Image (tube, coloured by chain):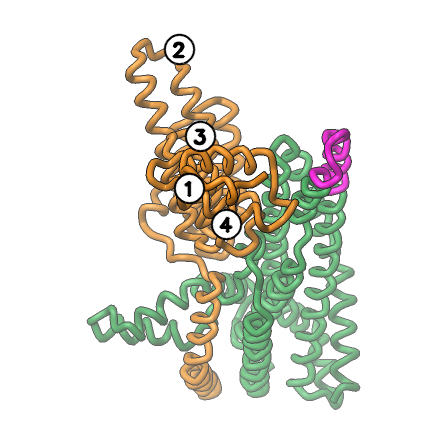
Amino acid sequence: MIRKGVAILILLAIGALLMPVERRIDADQRAVHLRKPTLNLELRERIGQMGFLAALSGFRSPLAAILWIEAHNAWERTEWGRMAGLFDTVTTLQPRSPLYWDMASWHMAYNASVAAREDPKQPSEILRQRAERQYIQLGKEILERGIRNNPDNAYLQNQLGIILRDKLSDDCAAANAFLKASELPGAPPFYARAAGYSMAKCPGKEKQAYELLKHLYDKGEDERKPSLISNIKDLEKKLDVPPAERIP
Amino acid sequence: MLNSVLPIAKNTLTDLIRQKVFNILLVFALCAIGSSIFMAKLTFQEEFQMLKDVCLGAMSIFTSLLAILATAGFLPKDLEDRTIYTLLSKPVPRYAYLMGKLLGIISLLFVFTVLMSAVFCVVLWTREQTVLAETRNATAGMSAEEIKAALKQITDATFNINLLPGIAIIFIKAALLASMTLLISTFATSQLFTVMAAAAVYFIGHLQATAREAWVGDVTSQWWSKILVAIVALLFPDLQAFNLTDDVIAGAAIPLGIFLQTFGLGVFYVTLYYAVSAFIFSGREL
């Protein structure tokens, strides 16, 4: 009995000595996003008791995978509302996985929105359009949350630009998103070109667009794509660039 | 000391292998192959992510279960078939006996982790080759640059060097659980108690970080609650520190410094629990 008491005291004393070390490891892991955010009661209600227990025991990723497959099955049955709920849970469980944010946003902004617009059960055109806009907005919001959780991810930022440009026709916001994406690590060169193209369509930003596209043009042959050249030529006319400064 | 530890470790490993624990590998392989076939209907990025999620999750579950169950069983078994008396009547110190047993179990966990990793890599590689072949067919006629980019996207989504430190952390977490179960079994009265207590510590360990923050942050005001939180924070290991695979699957890298710190913490806990087990076991009446 005495030995057991001494053993507990030893463990408590070493635990106290180890606490600063563990807290430092915890802080270091958090700094590189290797620690997951705390689970909350809202998630507990969504995934049920067993799911919550699994998530608490370090099985977040398999649980997220199972729920993702469930969302895929819901997609096959075109249960858009259920999919949105499952996506919310999956992205809460695995917020550092860009794939989940990207696919969830794509399903909502592209598949669900089109399905809502062409919903045969809804006779009102206005309500169909409203539902379409809501799903696009949801897709955009999913990406924005994904970006907040993965601020260094150029791909998600670029996807946001695509939704803003193609689905919401907001060229100014799209240009900003593409520009941010092009400045992030690992961004391919076409993100900067996409920023320039959208900026060229944004009223008041033509000069900035011209400077960006011209800068890319001056980088060399690899950047001189047909779209880049035609955009620069259009901007040269619009901005009345002197002939000597124009591209051949 | 090694002269007595190594034969015990070898015998423990052989004994555990004879108990057909490697049959779990079949279940793991079924999990991996079955899920890969089922997930072939998803996009390749989704498929590879799910495959990694399921396989690494299964690895974590199986190694943790094996660590707890194998360690919880040996002491009651040795007492029941009286091999412990034969062993300890020879010039084998009790701490050497425990160390041999623990080394045997950790060796088993190591072999088991390596074999599961091999199955996982084979399944992932097979699926990667299938998807690469499909993509080569689908992109025939495109420019070499486009084909190269498409193929790179696939290879980037499959193997990632960061999976290795992730798997190493799964192993050290299992070794920690084995050592912790050994500690419980030195004062437990039955195998069932050891398993139940180890499972409870497993769950508490995953909540330890929350308890620690509550204690340090002075969240609770009642004295008894403060003492309880302090005991949890000091007595149990922070097992969340060893759950790094979720983010590795998502593509995050484990910096070498953090990997070494985490692995070192695991090794320290294994040693600590072994030392305390040896201390308790040396005074136990057999």
Q: Write down the residue under mark 2.
A: A120
Residue B267 horizontal side relative to residue A142, left or right: right
- The answer to whether tags 1 and 3 share a subunit is yes
Q: Chain of mark 4?
A: A
B135 magenta-colored: yes
Question: Which chain is drawn using orange?
Answer: A
Q: Is residue A47 visible?
A: no
Q: Are marks 3 and 2 in contact (CB under 8 Å)?
A: no
Give the mark nearest the N terminus, 2 or 1. 2
Give the amino acid at mark 1: Ala
User: Is B224 situated above or below B137?
Assistant: below
Residue A182's tag is 4
Residue A175's tag is 1
Q: Dividing the image into 4 quarters, which one contains the C terminus of chain B?
A: bottom right
Calculate the distance from the C-alpha at mark 3 to the C-alpha at mark 4. 18 Å
Residue A207's quadrant in the figure?
top left
Spot occupied by residue B242 in the image (x, y as percentages of width and height): 53, 65
Q: Nearer the viewer, residue B67 or A182?
A: A182
